[in-house]
Image (cartoon, rainbow, N blue to C red):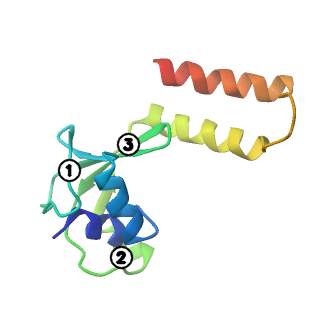
Amino acid sequence: MRIDKWLWAVRVFKSRTLATEACGGGKVKIDNKSIKPSRDIKPDEVVTVQSGPVKKTYRVKGLLEKRSSAKIAAEYVQDITPPEEKLKEEIAHRSYIARYKGAGRPTKKERRTIDKIRNINRS
């Protein structure tokens, strides 16, 4: 089964086009190697997906041919993302909600959040 089709079927990406573009752009890796969208995937492989500042890691539990409900899709993928990456995602999500373009200078609270994100990305 193709990696782009699997990523779409287990709901890592909202569309197959987005999954294909991510694979082609070097955002999806297996064994720290960038892969093509047409690469075949096998059970028990570990897939890393770069999504903004966060690297999400998934283990393939099974192959799902068609996109189906989230409950069914959860049986075919295991999220093994490290806790520090999940923290990065949480902080990035909070700062995205707090700021919008044209908002002027950040407040003290927003500045602290921005500093947290920068410190996590450096380590």
Q: Is residue 42 above or below residue 113?
A: below
In percent of the image, x 45 and y 18: which residue is there? 123
Residue 72: assigned label: 2
Q: Check disc 2 and give the amino acid type.
A: Ile
Residue 51 seen from this side? yes
Label 2, residues with CA under 10 Å away: few <14, some 14-19, many ≥20: few
In percent of the image, x 36 and y 58: which residue is there? 21
**Residue position marked by numbered label 1 in the rendering:** 35
Label 3, residues with CA under 10 Å away: few <14, some 14-19, many ≥20: some
Residue 69: x %, y % from top left? 42, 79
Spatial distance from mark 3 to mark 2, Cα to Cα?
Answer: 20 Å
Q: Is residue 32 above or below residue 39?
A: above
Tell me if 45 is positioned left or right of 64 in this view: left
Q: Check disc 3 and give the amino acid type.
A: Thr
Decide which of 39, 75 is in the foreground and name it: 39
**Residue position marked by numbered label 3 in the rendering:** 81
Local SS, label 3: loop
Say whether disc 3 or disc 2 marks the residue closer to the N-terminus. 2
Say whether disc 1 or disc 3 marks the residue closer to the N-terminus. 1
Q: Nearer the viewer, mark 1 or mark 3?
A: 1
